[in-house]
Image: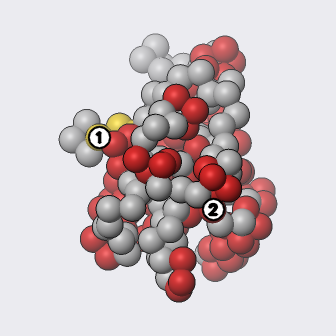
Amino acid sequence: SYRDKALYMLCAASGCRIHEALQILIEDIDLKERTVNLIDPNTRITNKSYKALTPENRNKLNWKGRQTYKTFLIQPFGDLFFEYLEEYIKNEYLNHEKHEFIFQHIRGNDKGKPFFLSAASTRNEAFKKATDKINLTTTLNQGVHSLRHMYGTYLLNYLPKADGSYGLPVAIVQKIMGH
């Protein structure tokens, strides 16, 4: 689905944790500037999207302690995220007044409900099927979290720098990744 492609590209582009990506609201994305912010739900608990949740579902909002809301998107994944996001919004997203979570269920009785409420095993199974479909036999087919590892490895070892060298210091990578 376009939703899954957008979700996977966001995780690959930003190195965010899957639960951080799934809790993004419409207001967290700036299409003009092509930026994505990751906001701790505890800092905006009065937001209408959170108020629309049942208390049980509100308790499922998860945050691991990211210190910065800004993301650093790497290419080509950043551009692919925005391309797939546009297709997802056009073709699969249910625009309604209940909440503004970007990632929603796109089928069945749960259509339109926030996707962060889905089971992690279900999301990882879908990711594994996607990687199997393209015969990806690396550690990436271990689950969506492997995209976070790929991002960190890229920043540490392969990100081109202005001086012709590659990679960022560990402390900077940790900050970018929300450690």
What's the CA distance linking mark 2 and mark 1?
Answer: 24 Å
Quarter of the picture containing the C terminus is: top right
Q: With respect to residue 36, does 11 lie above or below? A: below
**Residue located beneath label 1 in the image:** 30
In terms of depth relative to the viewer, which is nearer, 33 or 136?
Answer: 33
Please say if 44 is above or below 93.
Answer: above
Query: What amino acid type should be assigned to the residue bearing mark 2?
Result: Leu
Side (left or right) of 105 relative to 79: right
Q: Residue furthest left?
A: 32
Considering depth in this image, is 119 or 139 the residue closer to the camera? 119
- Counting the numbered discs, the total is 2
Q: Measuring 45% from the left and 71% from the top, which residue is drawn there?
A: 112
Q: Secondary structure at mark 2?
A: helix
Q: Are marks 2 and 1 in contact (CB under 8 Å)?
A: no
Residue at 66% x, 37% y: name it.
Answer: 63
Q: x, y percentage for residue 35? A: 35, 37
Q: Is residue 58 visible?
A: yes
Task: Report x, y in % for residue 151.
Answer: 61, 40
Residue 137 visible, this orientation: no
Q: Which residue is mark 2?
A: 117
**Mark with earlier residue (2, 1):** 1
Q: Position of residue 166 (x, y in %)?
A: 57, 24
Task: Classify mark 2: residues with Cα within 10 Å, few (<14), some (14-19) or many (20+).
Answer: some
Which residue is rendered at x = 32% and y = 62% of the image? 97
Q: Which mark is residue 136?
A: none
Residue 130, above or below 80: below
Describe the element under mark 1 as helix, strand or loop.
strand
Which residue appears at 41% of the width and 57% of the height? 99
Q: Is residue 87 left or right of residue 139?
A: left
Mark 2 vs mark 1: in front = 2
Q: Amino acid at mark 1?
A: Asp
Residues 41 and 72: in front is 41
